[in-house]
């Protein structure tokens, strides 16, 4: 479909549809919320909209648990956040980068990223399929899950196991959400992330996620060149080899952070994925609790912060949120790590390190 025709259809849909707007941004007024520093109030613009109201072409896929509604409640809500430059005298320098978050909505993460000068959004995309195809026994195809991830992200035909249409892939939903955001919040300049043909300018996008979302972020970035990839507690897909495919995104742009008590370490999931991605080429694994930034310019950062032996908290403590590690003053302990992951110049890399001989790369069960 020609871009101009598509743009007209989108404009018509946007003009004729009643949109769901989050109570956090009534009348598009900036929302007041608590900053990561509990002593400081800050103003964010926070917006929400349903994918099915932005684009009437969207639909549910019950066979892979990709639904527009569940129990009569909407599940297809996209979220966005930005910090206006007028919110305080010492506003952060604008990063001119968009972070697309590939996991559930996290206000704490969105606020942290907005505080660094980023625009940030997430859209509803197919990830429920993992409960059907991501369990043992693994499909015979060693790229099977990676193909599903790519189809869920792009809405293009990459896997014989699912059939996700273009309007329901992350790419198209994010693109139309950006158009919607520009119409409803033009002062935040969401349109800077769209080119003259209303396509996403991926060279200005940081793709990021946690766990399942980190894995899909990495798979998408191998397919589509992006500005950076930030992977929290991931990637996994421990039986797959797509991590070693030729990558459209230069490998020095991949950054990972995880806790050593996370089961992804006891199962060698992270060490193998990081090595298959070639991240050992850019420095050793660095413990952020014992070495300050810039962490030897490494792409592989770990923590052994105290989580009272709780494996689940270890999995989730590496992102801003309730499970994150805090200092005695209430601030986040890993604030420097997060700033490094999202802002460290990608051209500055560490020295190559050897692969870990104790890391099991082939984890497929023997016949």
Image (spheres, rainbow, N blue to C red):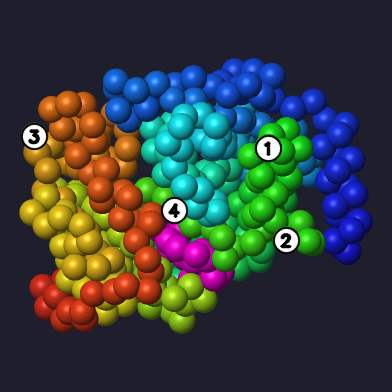
The answer to the question of whether label 1 and label 4 lie on touching residues, with beta carbons closer than 8 A, is: no
- The residue where tag 1 is placed is 187
- The kind of secondary structure element at disc 3 is loop
Q: Is residue 240 visible?
A: yes
Q: Residue 156 got which mark? A: none
Which residue sits at x=29%, y=20%? 39
- The residue where tag 2 is placed is 195
Could you tell me which quadrant the C terminus lies in? bottom left
Q: Which comes sooner in the sequence, label 3 or label 4?
A: 4
Residue 300 on the magenta span: no
* Segment colored magenta: 214-230
Which residue sits at x=37%, y=48%? 210
- The residue where tag 3 is placed is 308
Q: CA distance from mark 3 to mark 1?
A: 45 Å
Residue 221 on the magenta span: yes
Which residue sits at x=54%, y=45%? 119
The spot of residue 121 in percent (x, y) is 55, 42
Local packing at callout 2 (Cα closer than 10 Å; few below 14, some 14-19, many 20+) is few
Query: Which residue, as the protein is rendered here, is positioned at the far front?
Result: 89
- The residue where tag 4 is placed is 208
Q: Which comes sooner in the sequence, label 1 or label 4?
A: 1
Local packing at callout 4 (Cα closer than 10 Å; few below 14, some 14-19, many 20+) is many
């Amino acid at each position: 479909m020609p871009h101009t025709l598509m743009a007209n259809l989108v404009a018509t849909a946007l003009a004729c549809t009643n949109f769901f707007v989050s109570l956090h941004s009534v009348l598009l007024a900036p929302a007041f919320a608590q900053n990561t520093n509990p002593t400081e109030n800050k103003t964010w613009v926070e917006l929400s909209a349903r994918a099915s109201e932005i684009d009437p072409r969207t639909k549910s896929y019950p066979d892979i648990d990709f639904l527009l509604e569940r129990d009569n409640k909407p599940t297809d809500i996209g979220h966005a956040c930005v910090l206006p430059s007028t919110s305080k005298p010492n506003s952060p320098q604008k990063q001119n980068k968009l972070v697309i978050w590939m996991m559930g909505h996290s206000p704490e993460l969105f606020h942290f990223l907005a505080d660094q000068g980023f625009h940030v959004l997430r859209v509803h995309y197919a990830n429920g399929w993992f409960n059907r195809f991501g369990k043992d026994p693994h499909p015979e195809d060693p790229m099977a899950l990676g193909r599903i991830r790519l189809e869920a992200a792009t809405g293009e035909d990459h896997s014989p196991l699912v059939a996700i249409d273009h309007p329901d892939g992350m790419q198209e939903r994010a693109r139309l959400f950006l158009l919607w955001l520009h119409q409803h919040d033009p002062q935040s300049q969401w349109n800077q992330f769209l080119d003259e043909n209303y396509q996403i300018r991926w060279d200005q996008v940081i793709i990021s996620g946690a766990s399942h979302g980190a894995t899909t972020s990495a798979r998408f970035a191998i397919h589509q060149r992006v500005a950076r990839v930030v992977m929290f507690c991931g990637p996994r897909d421990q039986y797959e080899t797509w991590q070693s495919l030729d990558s459209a995104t230069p490998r020095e742009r991949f950054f990972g952070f995880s806790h050593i008590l996370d089961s992804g370490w006891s199962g060698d999931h992270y060490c193998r994925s990081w090595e298959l991605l070639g991240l050992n080429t850019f420095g050793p694994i660095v413990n952020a609790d014992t070495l300050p930034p810039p962490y030897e310019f490494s792409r592989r950062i770990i923590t052994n912060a105290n989580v009272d032996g709780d494996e689940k908290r270890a999995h989730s403590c590496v992102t801003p949120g309730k499970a994150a590690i805090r200092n005695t003053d209430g601030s986040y302990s890993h604030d420097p790590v997060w700033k490094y992951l999202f802002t460290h110049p990608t051209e500055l890399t560490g020295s190559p390190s050897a692969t870990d001989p104790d890391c099991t790369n082939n984890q497929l069960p023997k016949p």
